[in-house]
Image: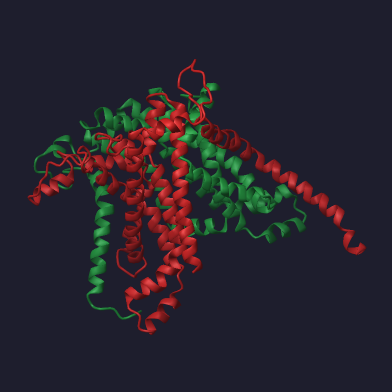
Amino acid sequence: MTKRSPATRPLQYLALAAYMAFLGFPLVFLLTTAFKTDREIRSPDPAFLPQSLNLDNFTAAIERADLFRAAGNSLLTAATTTAIVTAVALPAAYALVRFRTRLRAAATGWILLSQVFPFILIIIPLFLLLKNIGLVNTLLGLVLVYAVWALPFALWMLQGYVAAIPVELEEASAVDGAGRFKTLRKIVLPLLAPGLVATSLFTFINSWNEFFFALVLIQDPDMQTLPLALARFVGAEGQVQLGPLAAAALLACLPSLVFFMLIQKRLTAGLLSGAVKG
Amino acid sequence: MTALAAPAPPRARRRSAEGRDAWLLVLPALLPVMLFSVYPLVYGVALGFTDAQAGLNAETHFNGLDNYAALAGNELFWNSFKIGLVWAFSVTALQFLASLGLALLLNLDLRLRWLARTLALIPWAMPPVIIAIMWQLMLNPNYGPVNRTLETLGLPSSVNWLGESAIALPVVIVVGVWAGMPQTTITLLAGLQSVPAELNEAAAIDGASTWRRFWHVTLPALRPIVTAITTLDLIWNFNSFALVFVLTAGGPGGTTMLPSLFAYNEAFRYGNFGYAAAMGNVMVVLIGAFLFLYLRAQMRRRHQ
């Protein structure tokens, strides 16, 4: 487009390469470590790539009963949270957009406000509250907390998608004699599907990754979620078993990595525009 | 006049019916949020003015400003608060500069841009616990690639990156920058793409250099987004917990003890709920004051 000095391009590529090394090297290192045998990791003259694609570290990680159970707990918690949040947020988001209540501003305000408050102010009362109703150390208690904290954001995201559906479509459907429920089912829901999927995946990943609430609310080792189990693994034996630790860490990120690959394009464009509309 | 007034009653009735519908749909979302996040937050702020303790039979008394009087003399807390400010401001500033550079590069027509963009996104998909584990492996004093590379280069190679009090905080800050770059980069990139190309072209025709165009055209157009993302980054970084908790747990010797970790220990290791909540209150007031001053300065600059 514009003239630049001949030295600029190579410098730009050099800078890009430096960024890629900084951002990518830890990831590549984690990936290769997960396939290396303990001897390879500890060898005084280490090779960058593993000698073979052996899966011993992965089987070692999966066979550890606590990691496996923790993954199950995480899956159960995240899936239940997602189901509840989606079921509750969908009608609410629709109502907030279409009926223009003052709640909409309140919801946005609450999202921003809840970001500023340090979690310590919320977790102590939540801990006391859940203890009173006997839900400390249960996955149900964790689901409750995750759902409540995911709700405002899910609402905010969904509002953007609802607002993008032209009201005229619904009015046309009503003129054609369809009842409100039929209009919602036949017109609104199909159009909302991609946004609904994105929102529920986002909720799922956030609960799958969450650490702080789980750390405080879950003390029973049988009930711990995957991030908790991994954090304890580091403390207990992670310094000894580097390979299985890398493999377990890699497996634990798979759901979110797959999700981010799927919505990458939407993330760079759609999510932000949806946020602006909301 | 009467003709206009006539249709009003049915319409008002419809509106109120709609309002009722709306409340009915919103209520299932509103009730749990009120019960499990608004109420706890108010309760948490109130706890900061009591002597609440963990344990079954502990009675809680309102004790006014006692917690704050005790906090004022608690050197460990203020030290932790200072560490929190150093951490939050360094990570936010470095994150912003690094992300702006990357966003500018990604906005150019360079080859392999897709790869860099994917790499820039991946940390976003990783739980903080995993990021911490990965960097622990990277920085492992014996087997980590960082020390191994230094060894090959003939530099001092037995550095215990996360275990020496003089360097632990800067090292943790670098990891924090790595972990937080995606949001900032993507947000800035979206902002850059919304800067009208005509503005830059016009400036180029007028003979402005690349640097001058960046400084006088791109950056001013980007300012609202820069304000928004640095504000959010500052809040997130100041309140961040999991990354540093897993990396160093506040050590060595408390040199990476962020205030969130400090308050967590006070509450759940020592059981002083009221005192810990008071720390939370102090944190929210001070960070709120910072944000207020920062946002006001940004607003004023925009109005000039």
Q: How is the image coloured?
A: by chain
Q: Quadrant of residue B116?
A: bottom left
In x, y percent, where is residue A52? 18, 42
- The residue depicted at 30 percent of the width and 67 percent of the height is B111
The tint of chain B in the picture is: red
Please give the letter of the chain rendered in green.
A
In x, y percent, where is residue A69? 38, 27
Count of residue discs: 0
A132 or A7: nearer the eye?
A: A132
Q: Residue furthest right?
A: B2
- The residue depicted at 45 percent of the width and 70 percent of the height is B195
In x, y percent, where is residue B277? 46, 32
Q: Residue furthest bottom?
A: B206
**As drawn, A34 above or below B101:** above
- Kindly tell me whether residue A155 is visible in this rendering: no
**As drawn, A203 above or below A7:** above
- The residue depicted at 21 percent of the width and 37 percent of the height is B163
Q: Residue furthest left?
A: B154
